[in-house]
């Protein structure tokens, strides 16, 4: 078990009681009373708070009492003397756990007072914590050993800021190598996944806030997100992991779609947002980290901007399987990690592209034409990245007349030469004479929803406009196209089609297509 601990960060007793009730109602499995947030702190106030929570809580949820040092993330700079008074009195008042900074525990007076209180209340435990709000620890394994050397009964808590998702692997390794009670994860957006899979890796607990407003650390998820979006109650050591690799990924609807479909199919699988910032080098490092740790249980990835071509290059360099269609397109949006080869401990990785069929199905359905009908349609494609490659490959196969527009003209020229079509600079867009215009860039994607790749004056009622951006469902481009009387095609239809194909690659089974559509519509 890895309980969800919810911090109660209130200014006074009434607020704390109200927050505790909300946390319990939301499904908290442990409460952390962050007494450093109390504005008029005293030992009597803390004892009253513990008594009130114990009296009113609906079940016997364990309590952690923390009075954090300001330098270690505390809210108010209380003296060490008062903070130790608070913790020793909390032990006497029946708190199951108290959390104190390892660095401050090294001071003899602090250590002796806390040890004495714990000796008189054997049901209480000490969490010795260390935080690094700037970056990784110099040597997290050595710090872990030092904590247990100083006080063997302690539960070590080691939390650091991940400046890149690749920084998380040291936390994963420590959890994998140790099996006693310990609390380990990474803070910040790049470290978000470490909070979720802490349960799979056996961390003693992980933290979740009541809501976004009451988060007490960077990257802290809410109880609702963990339980509803990330299937917290179903995670165990055998849970297989999937995720979307990209930058950005916070906008992605893929976790909601795939996790709901996994749940509907009763599969022990979990889908995560994987923010992999930077270029090819960082992606290569991330995938190398994954492949070197088969015990993490990653089995597949969706791949989005900016890594679709980088992912293809990676799989080819690893001599993995590349779907012929993906090879022709020159970009992939799906990776599958198979069982290790007999001659190697490294899993075999395969690459596919489901954008191709997703885009064609979306266009033919909305325009009510067959693939043969593209011969008579002039098409303008904006962008020259991974999505554009899939779209251009699909349309050239249907003998469409395509012109590619891109900010970097050399990229447009290169893509046009590969698929034998025309190209032009993005500045030429206002003069287009196309029946179908397709935006394959991220322009207009959340959170930049007020941007559009094409001026409103260029949109005509005899055009069809397809925006591959799916969040928001109706971009500014589509909204203005509709106002001009043009036919519009949303990125949602492409997203659902390609996601269904990915689900089949991940699981070997067809998805509940109607459920997938409903999830996307509900998110809208």
Image (cartoon, rainbow, N blue to C red):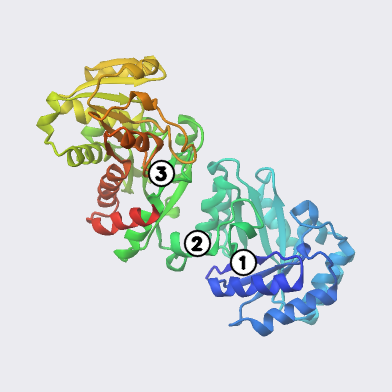
Q: Which marked residue is nearer to the observer: mark 3 or mark 1? A: 3
Percent position (x, y) of residue 29? 57, 73
Horizontally, residue 20 falls left or right of residue 149, namely: left
Q: Nearer the viewer, residue 380 or 272?
A: 380
Residues at marks 1 and 2, CA–CA distance in whole angstroms = 12 Å
| Identity of the residue drawn at 48% across and 61% down | 200
* Snapshot quadrant of residue 83: bottom right
Horizontally, residue 405 falls left or right of residue 511, namely: right
Q: Nearer the viewer, residue 448 or 509?
A: 448
| Identity of the residue drawn at 86% across and 60% down | 107
Residue at numbered disc 3 = 472
Let me know if residue 230 appears in the view. Answer: no
Percent position (x, y) of residue 248? 48, 39
Residue at numbered disc 2 = 226
74 vs 399: above or below? below
Residue at numbered disc 1 = 6
């Amino acid at each position: 078990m890895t309980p969800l601990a919810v911090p109660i960060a209130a200014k006074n007793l009434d607020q704390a009681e109200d927050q505790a009730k909300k946390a319990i109602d939301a499904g908290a499995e442990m409460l952390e009373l962050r007494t450093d947030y109390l504005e008029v702190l005293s030992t009597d106030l803390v004892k009253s708070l513990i008594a009130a929570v114990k009296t009113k809580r609906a079940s016997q949820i364990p309590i952690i009492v923390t009075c954090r040092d300001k330098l270690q993330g505390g809210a108010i700079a209380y003296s060490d003397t008062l903070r130790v008074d608070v913790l020793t009195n909390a032990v006497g008042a029946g708190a199951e756990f108290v959390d104190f900074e390892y660095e401050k525990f090294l001071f003899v007076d602090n250590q002796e007072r806390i040890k004495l209180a714990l000796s008189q209340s054997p049901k209480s435990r000490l969490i010795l914590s260390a935080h690094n709000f700037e970056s990784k620890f110099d040597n997290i394994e050595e710090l872990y050993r030092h904590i247990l050397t100083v006080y063997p009964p302690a539960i070590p808590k080691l939390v650091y800021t991940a400046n890149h998702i690749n920084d998380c692997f040291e936390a994963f390794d420590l959890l994998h190598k140790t099996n006693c009670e310990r609390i380990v994860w990474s803070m910040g957006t790049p470290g978000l996944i470490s909070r979720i899979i802490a349960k799979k890796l056996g961390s003693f607990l992980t933290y979740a806030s009541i809501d976004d407003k009451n988060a007490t650390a960077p990257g802290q998820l809410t109880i609702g997100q963990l339980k509803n979006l990330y299937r917290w109650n179903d995670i165990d050591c055998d849970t297989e992991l999937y995720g979307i690799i990209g930058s950005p990924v916070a906008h992605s609807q893929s976790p909601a779609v795939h996790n709901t479909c996994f749940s509907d199919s009763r599969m022990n699988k979990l889908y995560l947002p994987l923010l992999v910032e930077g270029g090819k080098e960082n992606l290569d490092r991330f995938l190398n980290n994954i492949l070197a740790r088969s015990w993490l249980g990653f089995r597949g990835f969706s791949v989005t901007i900016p890594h679709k071509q980088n992912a293809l290059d990676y799989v080819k360099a690893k001599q993995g399987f590349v779907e012929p269609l993906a090879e022709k397109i020159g970009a992939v949006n799906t990776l599958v990690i198979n069982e290790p080869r007999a001659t190697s401990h490294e899993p075999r990785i395969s690459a596919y592209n489901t954008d191709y069929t997703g885009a064609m199905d979306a266009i033919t359905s909305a325009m009510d034409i067959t693939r043969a009908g593209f011969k008579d349609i002039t098409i303008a494609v904006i962008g020259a990245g991974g999505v554009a490659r899939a779209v251009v490959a699909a349309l050239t196969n249907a003998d469409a007349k395509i012109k590619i527009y891109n900010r970097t003209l050399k990229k447009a020229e290169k893509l046009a030469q590969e698929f034998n079509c025309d190209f032009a600079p993005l500045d030429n867009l206002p003069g287009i004479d196309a029946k179908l215009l397709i935006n394959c860039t991220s322009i207009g994607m959340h959170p930049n929803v007020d941007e559009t790749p094409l001026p409103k004056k260029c949109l005509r009622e005899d055009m069809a406009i397809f925006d591959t951006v799916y969040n928001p469902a109706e971009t500014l481009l589509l909204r203005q196209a509709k106002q001009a009387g043009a036919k519009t095609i949303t990125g949602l239809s492409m997203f659902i089609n390609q996601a269904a194909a990915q689900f089949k690659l991940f699981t070997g089974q067809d998805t509940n297509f109607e459920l997938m559509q409903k999830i996307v519509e509900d998110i809208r």
